[in-house]
């Protein structure tokens, strides 16, 4: 049956198998130090099939294939403590829509007497089409994972090119990328391949796998601007042993902040000669809401027409009620004035109606109006600089400066 938007557990198109799990890693707490190992396997949940275009699906059934080795040779013993050397284990995801990854803990024997075991793992997704009896349709196998495995690579390093700020070590210090030019670059000694993927919410973005010698460069495709991602890099050596590193990135915009700038989008400033106002559009490119605290603007009385005195009378903000919320300013430039004037103000949050201080995620309909006391006749807007100070309540620990007229030469600065 065809897939629907919310999907059916373990079911998509009857003609298409599930996509393969794109990675398989052992979490850092995994160990084989006692009689039994405690191996915490994790892989990105499979959420599409291999149809073209792919259907959205939900997978509840995964098959973990565990092969027991002694050194590099598959064990031939079928008796205790381990049983058959190759076993398939059903791993059931009871909540396939929750989170981007699935974790399964396996506890096979660590050894038999003096003989120490090594395990090879793969995982595949299975779905059942309609009909009776149900026949499971299987994905291809995931990449291979060995555990325990002594990783022989060294000096493994993960960087993001053209990052605007951050070191990537924590969510609070995530690399702010220079969208769309930034790449994840993996380097090191003794590496033969690397894989990278991003996780956020219930989404996993596979950045791909590369083999051969390092460095490996992964373009940051499909990432949403303003979104915070956990970056997982799996580096492998010649023996197939893996090192997994976790870093954090935030996909930046072309302006370095969440609002589109006039340089990139001329519709940010809406002005035409013959009107007494200038409209400024706050186009939120980020996946989070913005809470506005302050705006700072500069206006040029020469451009406004200084043959007579000019007054910037007020700014109208969208309100939470009927009509606009007006911040009265009365900023006067006298006849003949040539000095650019600076105004710092905030949306009015008292009186009636009060300003709406939230710019919703990925919207373009928040527009303010800057009013003057006379008709403006110059070909260009008298507003020469406009900066918005905001926070993203779910992300930022401090206020962000976002200069949208003109695009700043120094990021996060209103000057």
Image: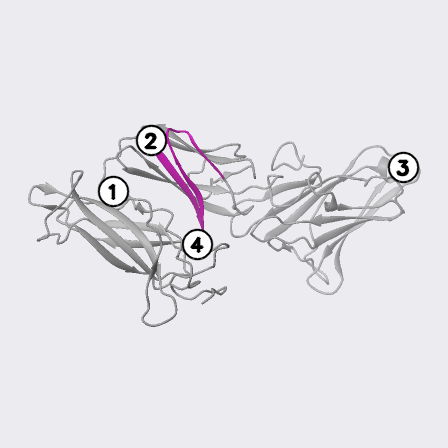
Taking depth in this image into account, of 124 and 16 the one nearest to the observer is 16
- Measured as percent of width and height from the top left, residue 399 is found at 58, 44
SS label for mark 1 = strand
Residue 98 image point, x, y percent: 41, 60
The secondary structure that dominates the magenta segment is strand
Mark closest to the chain's N terminus, 2 or 4: 4
Q: Residue furthest left?
A: 113
Marks 1, 4: nearer the viewer = 4
For mark 3, what is the residue?
306
**Residue at the (71%, 65%) spot, across then down:** 321
Q: Earlier in the sequence, mark 2 or mark 1?
A: 1
Which label's residue is closer to the chain start, 3 or 1? 1
Report the front residue among 352 and 218. 218
Q: In the rendered structure, find residue 50 and report the number of the disc placed on it.
A: 4
Q: Residue at x 45, y 54 (%)?
A: 201
At numbered mark 2, what does the secondary structure look like: helix, strand or loop?
A: loop
Identify the magenta region.
191-219
Residue in the picture at 22% in, 50% down: 66
Instruction: Judge the density around disc 3: few (<14), some (14-19), many (≥20) Cα neighbours within 10 Å.
Output: some
Query: Pointers 1 and 4 in contact (CB under 8 A)?
Result: no
Task: State the separation of the CA atoms marked 3 and 4.
Answer: 66 Å
Q: Nearer the viewer, mark 3 or mark 4?
A: 4
Kindly identify which numbered label has been placed on residue 243: none
């Amino acid at each position: 049956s065809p897939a629907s938007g919310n999907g059916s557990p373990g079911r998509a198109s009857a003609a298409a198998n599930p996509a393969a799990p794109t990675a398989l890693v052992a979490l850092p707490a995994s160990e084989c130090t006692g009689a039994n190992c405690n191996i915490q396997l994790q892989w990105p949940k499979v959420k599409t099939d291999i149809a073209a275009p792919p259907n959205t699906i939900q997978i509840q059934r995964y098959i973990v294939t565990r092969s027991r080795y002694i050194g590099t040779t598959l064990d031939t013993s079928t008796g205790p403590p381990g049983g058959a050397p190759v076993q398939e284990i059903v791993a059931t995801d009871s909540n396939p829509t929750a989170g981007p990854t699935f974790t399964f803990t396996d506890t096979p024997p660590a050894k038999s007497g003096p003989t120490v075991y090594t395990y090879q793992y793969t995982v595949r997704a299975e779905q059942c089409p309609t009909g009776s009896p149900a026949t499971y349709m299987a994905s291809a196998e995931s990449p291979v994972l060995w555990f325990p495995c002594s990783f022989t690579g060294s000096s493994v390093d993960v960087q993001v090119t053209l990052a605007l700020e951050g070191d990537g070590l924590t969510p609070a210090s995530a690399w702010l990328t220079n969208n769309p030019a930034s790449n994840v670059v993996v380097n090191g000694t003794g590496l033969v391949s690397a894989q990278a993927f991003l996780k956020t919410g219930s989404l996993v973005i596979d950045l791909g796998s590369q083999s051969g010698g390092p460095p490996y460069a992964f373009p940051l495709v499909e990432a949403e601007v303003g979104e915070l991602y956990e970056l997982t890099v799996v580096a492998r050596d010649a023996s197939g042993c893996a090192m997994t590193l976790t870093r954090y990135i935030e996909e930046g915009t072309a302006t370095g902040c969440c609002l589109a700038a006039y340089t990139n989008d001329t519709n940010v400033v809406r002005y035409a000669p013959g009107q007494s106002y200038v409209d400024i559009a706050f186009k939120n490119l980020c996946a989070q809401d913005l809470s506005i605290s302050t705006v700072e603007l500069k206006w040029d009385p020469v451009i406004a027409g200084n043959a007579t005195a000019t007054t910037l009378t007020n700014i109208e903000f969208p309100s939470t009620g009927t009509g606009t919320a007006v911040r009265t300013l009365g900023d006067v430039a006298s006849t003949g004035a040539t000095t650019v004037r600076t105004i710092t103000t905030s949306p009015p949050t008292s009186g009636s109606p009060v300003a709406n201080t939230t710019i919703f995620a990925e919207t373009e309909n928040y527009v303010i109006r800057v009013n003057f006391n006379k008709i403006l006749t110059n070909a260009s807007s008298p507003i020469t600089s406009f900066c918005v100070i905001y926070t993203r309540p779910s992300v930022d620990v401090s206020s962000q400066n976002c200069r949208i007229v003109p695009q700043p030469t120094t990021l996060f600065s209103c000057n």
